Amino acid sequence: MPQTIVIFGASGDLASRKLIPALYLLECKKRTVHPLRVVGVSRTPMTSEQWRNKLGETTKRFTGAAFDRESWEAFAPSVHYFPGDIDRPEMFGGLDAYLRSLEGDDESGRLYYLSTSPALYPIMIRHLGQSGMADPSRGTRRIIIEKPFGSDLKSARRLNQEVHASFDENQVFRIDHYLGKETVNNILVLRFGNTIFEPIWNRNYIDNIQITAHEDVLVGHRATFYEKAGVFRDMFQNHLLQLLTFVTMEPPARFEADAVRDEKVKVLRAIRAMTPEEVVANTLRGQYRSYRDEPGVDPLSRVATYAAMRLMIDNWRWKDVPIYLRSGKGMSCRTTQIVVQFRQAPHSMFERGETSSLFEANRLLIQIQPAEGIQIYFQTKVPDTDMEIRQTQFNFNFRESYQGELPEAYQRLLLDALNGDASLFARNDEVEIAWQIIDPIQRVWDDSDSTDPDCYEINSWGPPSADAWIRRWGHQWFDLCPVLH
Ligand code: BG6
């Protein structure tokens, strides 16, 4: 069936940096169903020709060596632009008529992509519903909603209600681009496509898990958004909790949207709730030194640009295994990694000397980005010694084993949404539970009596207090960057 993708917020960054390049590359690989039309909608007055010309430049910039002028010229005619004010209900009637004129008599599927300011989501969704544009009787009608999905549990619930007044849940695709990353999907393959990991993937063998998403960039021009969000809303509620679900959920019976999401919801529900006192003990916040000098930031801002959190999952598999999550901006390097720290061997018949700490026990490291790969740490005998043992590593590197660049997350996610596969998208209950976990933490730190976040230098691994904090729990951060090359 032919498909039309309608991008609301077409003149924004996401469309030119990610969405159009992803659609163009999918077309080059002949992955999309044909014919595919792309219609951009935003307030900026522009013709389709003008938008195409702009996109030609930006797509070249953002696809680099993969750009081919001839393929772009072949793709460009399927890109159209409709100027319109999303606030005005009559715009939707005009847009619908325009889409029909492009679709002709085709039974065409439509995928609406909301990539405007989140404040406009409710009104857009309502207008799509009221204008009949969500009605699937003339072809599939699906909607992708960009993050953030709400800013707390209350607003997420309200947005879900708004969505369900116009769309059925099976038409809705809430995006978290981390779920489109190849290395994140590989977590499922590692766990459920092999036999050797799953039997030891539990409290009997695993001592703790550390999930880190560090970035070297600063807040920059996003200060207005960041002042309202902070790191818990920006990175923990979505990306970090999604990574946690992939690492800790039970095996779904099938790789199907509801089978996968049921398991994710179950494990999120099993995360232990914290009292305000427990929040203070189990979380730690930081702010990089120059944050308050960024344009648009309150000079007394207490917004956290770094945070660490210790969670417990109360189920048979994970009881008493701490899961540490942390993320920061202005870090010494960009790394998203998951460290599964196994327990020490119960008894050693060897002289272990300096190698006796937990840190030297087996460890599995999943490097999500950059230098995507996996490392397994294990002990070996040092040759030509009596019985000296030393920790060594097995390395697996995606780019060495599979030639070529890994595709950007948006390619996979757009293709799945076009095909109606929601396995890698968040369900309504999933986003609400994630907010239910984050809200009480955010509330404690928003309280006027709470302390300021700990200051840290740019180009560090966060506030020095983070090391003392994790040591208090009997653990140590795994700080090594880059892990693989
Ligand atoms: C976004 C956050 O969702 O993810 C940004 O809003 C963050 O603050 C970005 O920089 C990180 O994404 P990635 O894919 O570069 O790790």
Image: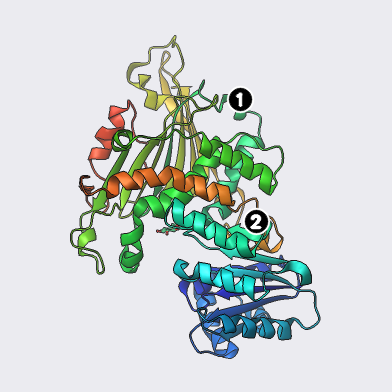
User: Where ligand 1 lies, by quadrant?
Assistant: bottom left
Q: What crowding class fits label 1: few (fewer than 14 Cα within 10 Å), some (14-19), or many (20 or more)?
A: few
**x then y, percent, for residue 445:** 28, 46
Numbered label attached to residue 169 = 2
Give amino acid for label 1.
Pro
- Which residue is more in the foreground, 192 or 143? 143
Give amino acid for label 2.
Glu
Lateral position of residue 347 relative to residue 415, left or right: left
**x then y, percent, for residue 185:** 60, 47
Lateral position of residue 320 relative to residue 279, left or right: right
Which quarter of the picture shows residue 192? top right
Q: Nearer the viewer, mark 2 or mark 1?
A: 2
Residue 405 visible, this angle? no
Residue at image coords 32%, 20%? 354
Instruction: Tell me how far mark 2 sits from mark 1, CA to CA.
Output: 35 Å
- Total numbered badges shown on the rendered structure: 2
Dot 2 falls on a residue whose secondary structure is: helix
Quadrant placement of the N terminus: bottom right
Above or below: residue 294 compared with residue 199: below
Q: What crowding class fits label 2: few (fewer than 14 Cα within 10 Å), some (14-19), or many (20 or more)?
A: some
Numbered label attached to residue 199 = 1
Above or below: residue 158 compared with residue 122: above
Lateral position of residue 231 relative to residue 378, left or right: left
Residue at image coords 35%, 43%? 441
Which quarter of the picture shows residue 467? top left
- Which residue is more in the foreground, 60 or 438? 438
